[in-house]
Image (cartoon, coloured by chain):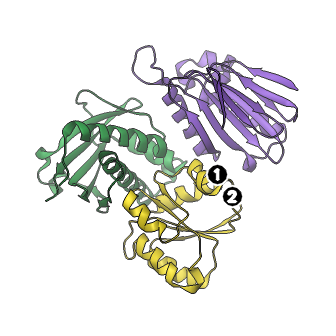
Chain colours: A green, B purple, C yellow
Amino acid sequence: MVEINEHKARQALIKASKDTLGEMAFLDVMELEEAADFKVGQQLFIEFSHPIRGRMLLSFPLEIKQAIVENIHATDWESLSFDEIDDCLLELLNILAGNFLRELHEESVKVQLSFPRVLFSLDEIGDIENFYVYYFDAEGSPFSVSLSLKEEE
Amino acid sequence: MMRLDVGIGEWQVSNRPEDELKTYALGSCVAVLAYDPKNRVAGLIHVALPDSKVNQDKALKLPGYFADTGLPVLFEEMQKKGAAKKNIKVKLTGGSSIMDQNRHFDIGRRNTIAIKRYLWKNGYGVVKEDTGGNSSRTVSFKVGDGTILVSNAGKSWEI
Amino acid sequence: MDLQKIMIVDDSATSRMIIKRCFQMAGYQDSTFLEAEDGLKAMSELNKTKVDIVVTDLNMPKMDGATFIKKLRLMDKTKELPVLVISSMGSDAMEKELTNSKVLGIIRKPMTPEKVVEVLGEG
């Protein structure tokens, strides 16, 4: 059984967020001590089943969505299709979740992830109140990553 | 050998094989080292801050001080001296972890990320990166063969 | 390494674009790139075309990366074909398993030109 501790999860998430967004989307990300208010422009969701069971919800405002996609594609927003934009954000979440799980377990285990998806409403998750919300800053704009972790049975 | 020293916010480009480009005490500043090995053209710029928006007067006087105004000038000059864009490879060093004066963010990290964003967008590949940490690096760059030597506190290593 | 034809296998179009761009920036700008979105499509393409290296993700629908590599090793044509794995899910256990399939290396996503150079050298 894998033991989860909130402090360790937080540290793993901070490292994974900084590394993934820095290396892939060229945005300097820092953790925020307090909750931040922002208008949600996009929500993405992924589940994992190994080494721990859990779910991750990535929420950001439109300006971060646009910066991420433009930076990764090295082009302007106007020249990108909806498919390209969605695929880009889903791949980012996929990598973020993979890196988070490996940070959490020091690379010693096999990681199992579901295919990430775009959320249209939080109702699709159901028990959002059970998620821990972590806030970050990406060069002046806040965003959040919500986590719900369960020990594997 | 001719040594060309590069100060903060400055750059040097050379196509003379006997030259060596050198910059000192990088701290949170980042040295961008660009090289076309086929045409043997080397360029070094010593960037201090990520974005010229904070001080546009300074950017006019010293464009190399900022990543967004300095990098285009560096590559333009390299091409004037015979480099072909498709051959140019980039290495980065410096970018030590130092907080800005309001202690909001790590300038070295932000510099490095801003530089990589520009390079990715414009099709220049970073093939080696030795950034971060707490040391103050000095770097020398041989035009003849592209050898880059980084040194700090009596130690030196090639990147 | 001399790589004239490079096959990229990944279900994400973004990821294929990033991998291709990283190779080009690492000096492989004159190579030809072939793309497939899963192991099954890659297999059928490899029946028709000879490539110098396969660069593959692991987590893909239809045929995942590990199965795809196993199948490559069973075919005469592709038995010795160099394979590079690029994944967000690599682990020590997986690395051991894949080493037995003679892969050149496992690169952890996000992909960068520097990681290409570390494994294959500059093009």
The residues bearing labels 1 and 2 have C-alpha atoms spaced at a distance of 7 Å
Please tell me which residue lies in front, C87 or C96.
C96
Q: Is mark 1 on a helix, strand or loop?
A: helix
User: Could you tell me which quadrant the C terminus of chain A lies in?
Assistant: bottom left
Q: Which mark is residue C101?
A: none
Residues indicated by labels 1 and 2 sit on the same polypeptide chain: yes
Q: Reply above or below: A129 against B32.
A: below
Please tell me which residue lies in front, A85 or A103.
A103
At a point 73% along the width and 45% down the height, the residue shown is: B88
At a point 12% along the width and 46% down the height, the residue shown is: A130
Q: Where is residue C32 in the image (x, y as percent from the top left)?
A: 66, 67
Please tell me which residue lies in front, B5 or A80.
B5
The residue wearing badge 2 is C29
The residue wearing badge 1 is C25
Q: Is mark 2 on a helix, strand or loop?
A: loop
Three-letter residue code for mark 1 = Met
Q: Are marks 1 and 2 in contact (CB under 8 Å)?
A: yes
At a point 22% along the width and 53% down the height, the residue shown is: A55
Three-letter residue code for mark 2 = Gln
The chain carrying label 2 is C
Q: From the viewer's perspective, tell me whether residue B87 is left or right of residue C48.
A: right
Q: From the viewer's perspective, tell me whether residue B141 is left or right of residue C89.
A: right
Q: Reply above or below: C45 against B91.
A: below
Q: From the viewer's perspective, tell me whether residue B14 is left or right of residue A51.
A: right
